[in-house]
Image (cartoon, rainbow, N blue to C red):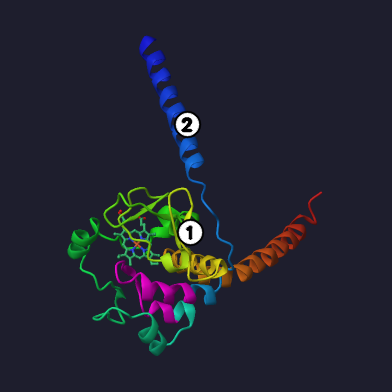
Amino acid sequence: MKIILRTGLLAGAVIFAAICGKAGYADEVQLQTPKYQFNKETIIRGGQFFAQNCLTCHSMKYLRYNRLVVDLGLDEKFIKDNFMTPSGAEYLRGMTTAMPPESAAKWLNAAPPDLTLAARYRGIDWIYTYLRSFYWDPGKPGGWNNHVFPGVAMPNVLFSYSGTTDDKGNVLEKAGYTSEEYDRITTDLAVWMRYTSDPSIIVRRQIAPYVIGFLLIFTLLAYLLKRAYWRDVH
Ligand code: HEC
C-alpha cells in the first residue's frame, strides 16, 4: 500500500513539475506566427534566398534538386542558376553545403545542422521566431546570441534586414531594409522550410478537394443504395 502511495505521489510530482516547466518555457519565449499564403511563389522565393544565404553553412541533403521540378514546376536551368550555389552540387543529389562539417564545427564551435526536416521537429513558428530573435551580445565569441536559442553558435546572417539590437531590444544599428521586407524574408524562409520538411504537402493539397468530392458523392450513392435495399423491409 505504502509503495503504491509513494509511487502515486512521485508520479504526481513529476507531472506537476513537467506542467510548470512547460508553462515557464512558454512564458519566457513568446513564439510569433508568420502570416503567409502557402503557395509556390512564396516557397520559391524562400528557397532562392536560402540557397544564396544559408546553404553556405547548412545542407538540405534529404531534398534532391530535381524534386523542385516536380513540386514547384521549375526548370533545370533555373534550378542550376538559383539553387545549386555550392560548387560540386549534383542535380540528382540532395542540396549540399560547401562547408565541410569538421571545419564548420572548428570555426563556429558547432556544426550547422542539416535543415531539411527542421520545421518538423521545431515547428514553423519556432523557426520564424528564431530567425527574428538574434541580439548583439559582446560576451559571446561571435558577438551574437538568440532569445529562443540561448548561446547559439550561428551568427545573425540577416542583420542587414533586422538591424542590430541589444538584449533589451534597443537599436544599436539600423536595418538597411524596411520592416515589411524583413517580415517577408523571414516568412519566406519559414515557408520554404515547411515545404522541405514535408514536400508532398503540395500534391496533397492539390488532390484533397477531389478526394473530399469523391467521398461526398460516394456517401450519396451509399445512402441511395441503402434506401433501395431497405425499401421492401417493413
Ligand atoms: C556561418 C554559418 C551559418 C549560416 C550562413 C547560417 N547558419 Fe543557421 N546555424 C549555424 C550553426 C553553427 C547552427 C547551430 C547552432 C548551435 O547548435 O549552437 C545553426 C542553427 C540554425 C537553426 C537551428 C537548427 C536547430 O534546429 O537546432 C536554424 C533554423 C538555422 N540555423 C537557420 C538558418 C537560416 C534560415 C540561414 C540563412 C538565412 C542560416 N541558418 C544561415 C550556422 C549558420
Q: Which residue is at 33% across, 80% downward?
A: 84
Quarter of the view holding residue 35: bottom right
Q: Is residue 38 above or below residue 231?
A: below
The secondary element bearing badge 2 is classed as helix
Q: Position of residue 135 (x, y in %)?
A: 41, 54
Q: Which residue is mark 1?
A: 128
Q: Position of residue 196 (x, y in %)?
A: 42, 67
Q: Position of residue 125 (x, y in %)?
A: 50, 55
| 229, above or below 27, in the image | below
Task: Indicate the quadrant of ligand 1 in the picture.
Answer: bottom left
Residue sitting at the far right:
234
Magenta stretch: residue 220 in it? no
Three-letter residue code for mark 1: Tyr
The mark found on residue 20 in the picture is 2
Mark closest to the chain's N terminus, 2 or 1: 2
Alpha carbon of mark 2 to alpha carbon of mark 1: how far?
A: 25 Å
